[in-house]
């Protein structure tokens, strides 16, 4: 067994006296600069725990002697930004939608503000470019369930769709299969008829006359004789080759069988009137507004 302080003949360093299977442990302490740095970080961390929020509690956390938080800092910055915007946003809030579109300066400000708000609140569903996704409308095209004028867009943003707000857009497509109104074979037939309205191919042996009759008996009251929809009811146009959930036969059968009831939240209690107005102008300017 090696003795502490022995000299290792290979490295020339002293040993600690520990030896395992003939392998001796060299006495090589950490560099002083490294130890001092390590101790300094410990002292720094203690100071940080005292000054800043750090220790989790059962239902809260220690706030630190400075009572600083990143959330609070962001809130202050946003408040300062709102002060800067204050006068301009007040002008925007007092102007009508039509006046905003006529005034280049107001229009540019509304679009800039609306783009930011859209990214923060609407992009998760409609996409950063507003191209939508399955079940979420594309806001760049000219196909609108509830209308694409400035006033109609703002109303939709304010009160949402099936949001529970008293002024929300309400519509309901009956679950024809689930409610037992149509039999499975009838649903397949009318699904193919719906596909034919926008020029899509139909299944072999499909009975067009029967499909038209089923459509007339059950769907015309909302979608119209030619399937061109009704914006007052939120009934989509079935003949324009624009599909919210998909145009394949299986998806249309699912829609007819179980109905659809997508929800858009009401923003009237979440965003101030000037911001909603800016958002409406921005969405209207994307390319599909009427």
Image (cartoon, rainbow, N blue to C red):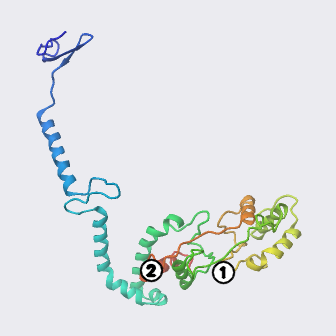
Please give the name of the residue rendered at 64% of the width and 67% of the height, measured from the top-left corner. 244
On the image, the x and y values in percent for residue 219 come to 78, 74
Q: In this view, does 158 lie to the left or right of 23?
A: right
Name the image quarter holding residue 138. Answer: bottom right
User: Distance from label 2 to label 1 (Cα)?
Assistant: 23 Å
Split into 4 quadrants, where in the image is the C terminus?
bottom right
Mark 2 or 1, nearer chain start: 1
Q: What element carries label 2?
A: helix
Q: Is residue 85 above or below residue 206?
A: below
On the image, the x and y values in percent for residue 249 come to 75, 60
Q: In this view, does 204 lie to the left or right of 28?
A: right
Query: Which residue is labeled 2 in the image?
Result: 278
Query: Which residue is labeled 1 in the image?
Result: 231
On the image, the x and y values in percent for residue 178 come to 76, 64
Q: Nearer the viewer, residue 248 or 93?
A: 93
Mark count? 2
Q: What numbered label is drawn on residue 143?
A: none
Q: Which residue lies furthest to the front in this view?
A: 58
Q: Is residue 114 left or right of residue 242?
A: left
Answer few, some or many: residues within 10 Å of disc 1's Cα (few below 14, many 20 plus, some between 14 and 19). Answer: some
Q: Given contact means CB atoms under 8 Å apart, are the residues at marks 2 and 1 in contact?
A: no
Q: What element carries label 1?
A: loop
Name the image quarter holding residue 28. Answer: top left
Q: Is residue 194 above or below residue 37?
A: below
Q: In this view, does 280 lie to the left or right of 4?
A: right
Q: Which of 205 and 177 is in front in this view?
A: 177
Split into 4 quadrants, where in the image is the N terminus?
top left
């Amino acid at each position: 067994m090696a003795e502490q302080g022995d000299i290792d003949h290979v490295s020339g360093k002293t040993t600690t006296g520990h030896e395992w299977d003939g392998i001796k442990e060299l006495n090589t302490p950490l560099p002083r600069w490294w130890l001092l740095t390590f101790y300094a970080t410990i002292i720094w961390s203690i100071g940080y725990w005292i000054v800043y929020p750090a220790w989790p509690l059962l239902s809260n956390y220690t706030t630190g002697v400075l009572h600083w938080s990143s959330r609070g800092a962001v809130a202050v910055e946003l408040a300062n930004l709102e002060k800067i915007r204050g006068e301009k946003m007040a002008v925007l809030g007092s102007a009508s939608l039509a006046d905003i579109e006529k005034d280049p300066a107001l229009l540019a400000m509304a679009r800039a503000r609306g783009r930011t708000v859209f990214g923060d609140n609407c992009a998760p569903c409609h996409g950063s470019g507003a191209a939508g996704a399955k079940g979420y409308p594309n806001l760049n095209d000219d196909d609108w369930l509830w209308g694409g004028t400035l006033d109609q867009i703002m109303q939709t943003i304010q009160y949402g769709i099936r949001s529970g707000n008293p002024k929300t857009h309400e519509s309901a497509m009956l679950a024809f299969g689930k409610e037992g109104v149509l039999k499975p074979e009838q649903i397949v037939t009318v699904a193919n008829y719906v596909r034919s309205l926008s020029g899509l191919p139909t299944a072999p042996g499909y009975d067009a006359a029967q499909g038209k009759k089923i459509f007339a008996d059950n769907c015309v009251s909302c979608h119209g004789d030619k399937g061109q929809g009704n914006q007052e009811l939120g009934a989509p146009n079935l003949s324009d080759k624009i599909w919210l959930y998909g145009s394949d036969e299986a998806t249309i059968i699912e829609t007819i069988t179980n109905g659809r009831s997508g929800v858009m939240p009401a923003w009237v209690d979440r965003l101030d009137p000037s911001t909603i107005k800016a958002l409406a102008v921005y969405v209207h300017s994307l390319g599909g507004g009427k």
